[in-house]
Amino acid sequence: MSTMHMTTLNSIMTFRAQNLPSEVTNGLRSACCALCGLLTVAVLVAPTAAQPALNPTEPLAFVGDQPITRAEVDLQLGRVSTADNPVAALPPALEGTTIHLIALQRQALQTLREMKQSVAPTELDKWFEEHPITDEQRSGPGEESIRQLMEFRLSWQPYLAKHLTDQNVQRHFDNQRQRFDGTLFNLEMISTAVPPGTSPARQVAVDKLLKLRQQAIENGDELSVVVRDDKAFELLKAAKLRGSGDLHPTLIDTVLKLKKNEWSQPVHSPVGVHVIHLIDVTAGTRELSEVEGEVRAHMLYFLLEHLAAKSSKQHPLRPAEQP
């Protein structure tokens, strides 16, 4: 991976948000740290292209009827963007990854509200009395977005304290050893970039990938030949992919279910649609004591997705251009 892409991963991990208290940035880091594998896939399916600075108030996507603006994406990445001083546009893959994260947070918060496990309004008001919103933040993401972000943070931490226990971490490791124990996967994957969220473009991508999959299986064609003439598709050939950190967790879920030389059906990630061919597996030997950080990181993502899924039908993520 290039230095630029490693820097991009680091920006997701560190969240050095200007003018935001550490409580906010720490909470974001907790919610994001398991998404590094997604960014690896994002780089593969959506190459970086130089883009001009854009309007920070522009809606990039919607969760239900609520827009996700460019300024909110910048906030997640620790960038301050205002109408008078917009920052440069992000690579499409990083932008899509961050949009997906914001959607998960909003959907999870809605679930916590319905479970009556969200922070009380009086406690939220008290927090903002102690940490006033600055004028720069109001002109960027806006007060409502920052309040919602902090409501998620203050509600998310007690939920984590209840579920992210040593016992649950051990159980998570035991149930998915191949994901964490250093097992290496030799695989091929065809990917095509699609914006995050539900859209007709995803079904179009599924149909195209099914045809490519069938062509490769029936004719025994090399995948490089199958995708050679279509620039919408990217091919990954990797002999030593790990179960944690190298691919988005959803894709690893699929890999773990495949037998040697088996092809997957099209599988969705936030940044695209993929078909995976598992060639071989080399067993790992690491124990929980060696990978506990990775297991906890995956549990954070797992718990966030679990909460979000309960509200995703009522508050779906969709691209801004979809009516």
Image: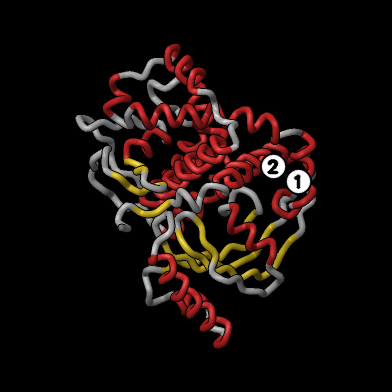
Q: CA distance from mark 1 to mark 2?
A: 6 Å
State if disc 2 and disc 1 touch (CB < 8 Å): yes
Residue 295 is tagged as 2
Q: Nearer the viewer, residue 81 or 139?
A: 139
Whether residue 2 is visible to the viewer of this picture, yes or no, is: no
Residue displayed at 69% across by 58% down: 184
Q: Is residue 254 left or right of residue 138?
A: right
* Dot 2 amino acid type: Val
Q: In the picture shown, does residue 259 fall above or below 322?
A: below
Q: Nearer the viewer, residue 244 or 202?
A: 202
* Dot 1 amino acid type: Phe
Q: Is residue 135 left or right of residue 293?
A: left
Q: Residue furthest top?
A: 130
Quadrant where the C terminus is found in the figure: bottom left
Residue displayed at 51% across by 18% down: 123
Residue 173 is tagged as 1
Callout 2 crowding tier (Cα within 10 Å): few <14, some 14–19, many ≥20? many
Query: Residue 174, how many percent across, how many down?
Result: 79, 48
Task: Identify the mark nearer the N-term, 1 or 2.
Answer: 1
Q: Is residue 239 left or right of residue 38?
A: right
Q: In the picture shown, does residue 290 fall above or below 93?
A: above
Q: In the picture shown, does residue 22 fall above or below 323?
A: above
Query: Residue 264, how many percent across, how many down?
Result: 60, 70
Query: Residue 261, how many percent across, how many down?
Result: 67, 74
Q: Could you tell me which secondary element the residue under label 1 belongs to?
A: helix
Which image quadrant is residue 284 in?
A: bottom right
Query: Residue 44, how many percent across, how many down?
Result: 46, 58
Q: Could you tell me which secondary element the residue under label 2 belongs to?
A: helix
